[in-house]
Image: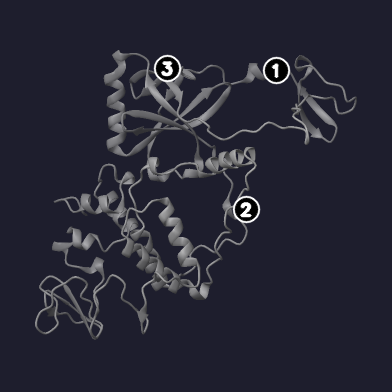
Amino acid sequence: MARPVWTGVLTFGLVTLPVGLYTATEDHTVHFHQLQRGTSDRIRNKRVNERTGKEVDTDKIVKGYELEEGEYVVVEPQELEEISPGRSKVIDLAGFVDLHQVEPVYFGRTYYVGPRGKEYGKVYELMRAALDRSDKAGIATLTMRGKEYLTALRAQPGVLVLHTLHWSDEVRDPADVVPELPQLGAKSDSKELRTAEQLIDALTIDWDPGDYHDTYEERVKRLVAAKREGEEVVGEPEPPESTNVIDLMEVLSRSVEQSRSRGRGGGRGKQDTDREETSGEGSASRSKTSRGKETAGRSKTSRGKETAGRSKTPRGKETAGRREVSRGKETAGGKETAGGKEAARGKSARRRGSSEDLAALSKAELYERATAADVPGRSKMTRDQLVEALARPGAAA
């Protein structure tokens, strides 16, 4: 059983809970030793006086803060200990925030939080369940190993987790470090944007971390095994060419069609294959189009009417409750409406909460509705789960 890296108490209002922190992750990176080329001699790092070239013992080394070149203020180890935050043993939850408000760039390391004794199990589970249902994170400061941290406490199934957060002045402004960022508010072509959203929806999958693994680590191990046996090492293929802006709409449309025809739930390798196919000039496996119209996996349309898997009425109109698009006009329930197509969000209020209406919304729009309706656990839901939750009676705003 692992030992806690920190022990203390967690306070929640007037509630005090003795807890311990346990390291939540471990490193599986393949490590190498440094050798002198042509030998098996290890290379060691030594602390050497740069003026004399002689090695210096650790107990004779002090810290120095450089004021100007060659001018230092020497600080002794005990002086740093005297001004350190000390051995604070309290995680005081000062407030709670919505989880989606904390940008991922602020997260540092993750620790599991466990109760220090079975007698505290009820209080522990109460706090975990309350955080889980509220979909919030508790913000607190923590002193550990002579350093003060900003932290966020949140709930996972069966356990509380504590994330160390970067202080605000530690997070760089992207505009200062990333060149050639597009300007905020730049307008995108609406058709391209809608197609990109369709592609995201078509490629949406349920999150299962077990579906992913470190392929680079595996390739390194295969490289080592191949070199040991004297076999030839085959390198990885070059990345696909960048998409030309002129071809963007065509590539997006093909990507949507491919993802729909293959269905959802493809693994990581499938997604990589899709990207490789859509980045080239074409593929024999792609469905042919006629006069710019795509027909892969869809029923043929007549005079702009789409009948994908739907029954037709004798005059080519769709059955009741379905749309009919004819000469720029839209019908609902077989009756023609004046004013052309009606947006999904413009449907009547009595059907606004139905799954058919909700399916036309993007995940961002669904999340906004879920927030307004205070749907619990919404930040962890997939698009389909949001639709299902909002379709329940009284759920949608």
Identify the element where label 3 is drawn: loop
Sequence-wise first label, 3 or 2: 3
Query: Which residue lies at the image location 75% right of the left edge and 17% below the top edge?
Result: 58
Question: Camera-side residue: 392 or 224?
Answer: 224
Residue 99 location (% of width, % of height) = 38, 41
| Residue with the most extreme right position | 52
Q: Is residue 1 above or below residue 329?
A: above
**In the image, what residue type sits under mark 3?**
Met
Quadrant containing the C terminus is bottom left
Quadrant containing the N terminus is top left
Q: Left of 181 or right of it: where is 197?
A: left
Residue 177 location (% of width, % of height) = 62, 52
Q: Are marks 2 and 1 in contact (CB under 8 Å)?
A: no
**In the image, what residue type sits under mark 1?**
Pro
Local packing at callout 3 (Cα closer than 10 Å; few below 14, some 14-19, many 20+) is few
Q: Is residue 322 above or below residue 272?
A: below
Local packing at callout 1 (Cα closer than 10 Å; few below 14, some 14-19, many 20+) is few
The quarter holding residue 112 reads: top left
Q: Kindly identify which numbered label has been placed on residue 176.
A: 2
Q: Kindly identify which numbered label has been placed on residue 253.
A: none
Q: Left of 36 or right of it: where is 51?
A: right
What's the distance in space between the residues labelled 2 and 1, CA to CA? 36 Å
Residue 257 location (% of width, % of height) = 35, 68
Q: Kindly identify which numbered label has been placed on residue 77.
A: 1
Query: Which residue lies at the image location 35% right of the left edge and 64% below the top edge?
Result: 198
Residue indicated by mark 3: 1
Sequence-wise first label, 1 or 3: 3
Query: Which residue lies at the image location 59% right of the left edge and 38% below the top edge?
Result: 225
Residue 308 location (% of width, % of height) = 22, 72
